[in-house]
Image: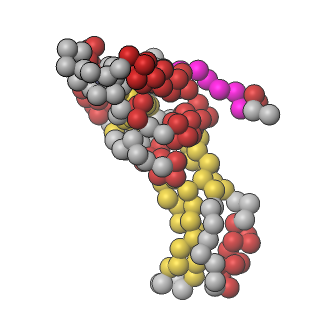
Amino acid sequence: MTTRFRIFHPEATGLGAFSAAMDAAKQQGGTVRVPHHSCSVRSMLGGLALAYDPELELEVVRVQLGEVSLAGAHGVLVMDELPEWKREVVEAVARVFHAGHVRLVLLGHRGGTAAGEKLVGSWAKRHIELPASFHVYATARRCPCGLSSNLCRCRPDAIKRFNDRAYSFRELFETPVSSGDAK
Ligand SMILES: [Zn+2]
């Protein structure tokens, strides 16, 4: 079995290894999602939202699939430039990655209509769980500027911070977390 998390360092290996991994994933029928590193937790994990349906004339609960669900079973979520991602987003994706499912909860509502209030009442503690068995292929450069080492003018401490960040994000995926530890 190949590992579900892989990280690629373009300066070290070129993009060949990354391209080969992507080709293999596509050949196996996996969907490849390439969200931008500025993505929010909400867009990565998805959620439930109330929306007014003019045909039904009712407030309905809409499922907004996140990137982890859009990748589908055994699809690939590409996390390009891993150190650039927000920590809260990386942590959220890693939790779902290890849990094997994502829980979508109903967040807020516009309110105002009687139908909406009723729905919120019945959905207030509701959530749905969707399976999540995606792979994560991350990339990380060796330093913030991304230039080759003879052109790079980054300070050593900046390079160290950048790599520490990549390392700690990598660990989130490579070290299974037990939810029982959170107290
Ligand atoms: Zn640099």
Q: From the image, which quarter does the C terminus lie in?
A: top right
Residue toward you, 52 or 43: 43
The colour scheme of the drawn protein is: secondary structure
Q: Quarter of the image holding residue 22?
A: top left
Residue toward you, 128 or 116: 116
Instruction: Inspect this view and state whether residue 104 appears.
Output: yes
Q: Residue at x 29, y 34 (%)?
A: 26
32 relative position to 173: left or right: left
Q: From the image, which quarter does the N terminus lie in?
A: top left
- Number of marks present in the image shown: 0
Q: Quarter of the image holding residue 114?
A: bottom right
Magenta part of the chain: 173-179
Q: Quarter of the image holding residue 92?
A: top right
26 relative position to 99: left or right: left
Q: How far across and down, in percent of the image, does residue 56 sit?
A: 52, 83
Q: How far across and down, in percent of the image, does residue 28 sit?
A: 33, 31
**Magenta stretch contains residue 177:** yes
Residue toward you, 159 or 36: 159
**Magenta stretch contains residue 15:** no
115 relative position to 42: left or right: right
52 relative position to 20: left or right: right
Q: Residue at x 48, y 25 (%)?
A: 165
Q: Residue at x 63, y 61 (%)?
A: 106
Q: How far across and down, in percent of the image, does residue 122 sit?
A: 73, 70
Q: Is residue 110 above or below residue 19?
A: below
Q: Is residue 25 above or below residue 167?
A: below
In the image as oriented, which residue stretches furthest toward the left?
A: 151
Instruction: Inspect this view and state whether residue 163 appears.
Output: no
Q: How far across and down, in percent of the image, does residue 108 sit?
A: 63, 66
Q: Residue at x 65, y 26 (%)?
A: 177
Q: Is residue 84 above or below residue 167?
A: below
Q: Is residue 20 above or below residue 29?
A: above
